[in-house]
Amino acid sequence: MYQNHSQKRGTRRAVIALWFLAPLCGEMLSGSSTPIEWLNPFVFILLGMLYGSGALLIRESVRRWGKGWPSILLLGMAYGIYEEGIVVRSFFDPTWGDLDKLAWYGRWLGVNWVWTAGLTVFHATVSTAIPILLVELMYPDLRHKLWLSQRGMKIHGLLFGSMAIIGMGFKMQAPPLAYIGCVVVMVLLVQRARRWSPPDRTQLQVKRLPRPRRIFLFGFLSMVGFLIALWIVPGIEPPALFSFGLFFVFPTLIIWRAKRLGVWAWGPLHQWALAAGALGFWILLALMAVAGPDMPIAGLLSILFLWWLRRRVRRYGVFPPTDAQLAPPPTESYLSLSQGAGA
């Protein structure tokens, strides 16, 4: 069986949307690369090769394995280590421009440990998981389909992998042991993502789902807590091990709370609320022009996009929550692969 013309066109649109949206979330909205910098086509293409191709490879790998969102988050962590540890090497560079106090606070054995933990969590959520979620909400009929053919996987793999070579142009050259450590952790995360098993669906009973506005607040406060752990707590200068440990304890608490809120049973509007809430604090910072005078442009565009997506989600209605949150049945994953995918 083959995809018809409209299906192929839909998958191409989804691929393009994720290729653009991932760097927009991870770089522009966070203020790492302000809107004015995106006028440089060279910067635009490089960020797409890194963020966009990386997010596509994560999404497609998880769908091929028949896994779910925990696997996406684990691969997102591996992505963060690849970008910050191998490509730009900010994990090891004490002169990295965004570090501020973290250039020396929590630095040990040549590693910026607090920064490393924080950026790994950031990339797993803002740079990868949230863009994937948003694009799947844009194209709900394609959420369990494969968007890339084998040829497409190779192309994006080449684009993504070439960033390690391009990254050699950065002045910071980490010792060989640092690269080895990054690769080892990445391999372990990929293995864990591939072996993850979804919970028993019969045990996922939710008495009453919270309103989407409550999920929005949950996402917003979770991101506020993350930024407090990354920037405010180090300013107080507690023992660095305490700050480092926050990035293990805090995500654990967030996952626990999400389960209490019935995350496995959330519908598309709940999922939109989580993503919008998590991005909401970054939008607020953008509107305040914290990272630059042109950042309100990014904030306003983000608001318009999320508003448009909410209307689209409401128009599509509610799809079965387990389809979005749990791994698809192996038969459906196999059929999607056998039908072919867009390049």
Image (cartoon, helix red, strand yellow):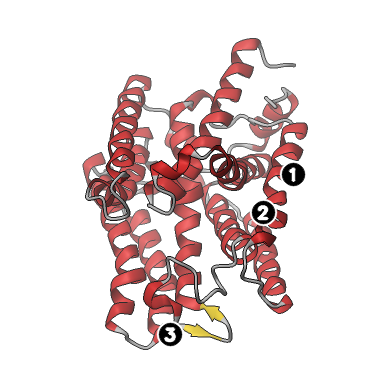
Residue hosting label 3: 241
Residue hosting label 1: 158
Q: Quick one: label 2 or label 1, which is nearer the N terminus?
A: 1
Q: Which image quarter: residue 190? A: bottom right
In-image side of 44 versus 1 (left or right)? left
Residue furthest out toward the top: 5
Residue hosting label 2: 194
Q: Quick one: label 1 or label 3, which is nearer the N terminus?
A: 1
Of the residues shown, which amino acid type is indicated by label 1? Answer: Leu
Mark 2: secondary structure:
helix
Q: Nearer the viewer, mark 2 or mark 3?
A: 3
Q: Report the quarter where the N terminus lies.
A: top right
**Crowd class of label 1 (few under 14; some 14 to 19; many from 20; radius 10 Å):** few
Name the foreground residue: 18 vs 140.
18
- Are dots 1 and 3 in contact, CB under 8 Å? no
- Residue 325 seen in render: no
Mark 1: secondary structure:
helix
Where does residue 182 sit, x and y in percent of width and height?
66, 69
Q: CA distance from mark 2 to mark 1?
A: 21 Å
Name the foreground residue: 195 vs 191.
191
Q: CA distance from mark 1 to mark 3?
A: 38 Å
Q: Which image quarter: residue 243? A: bottom left
- Residue 63 seen in render: yes
Q: Compared to 332, does 283 lie above or below? A: below
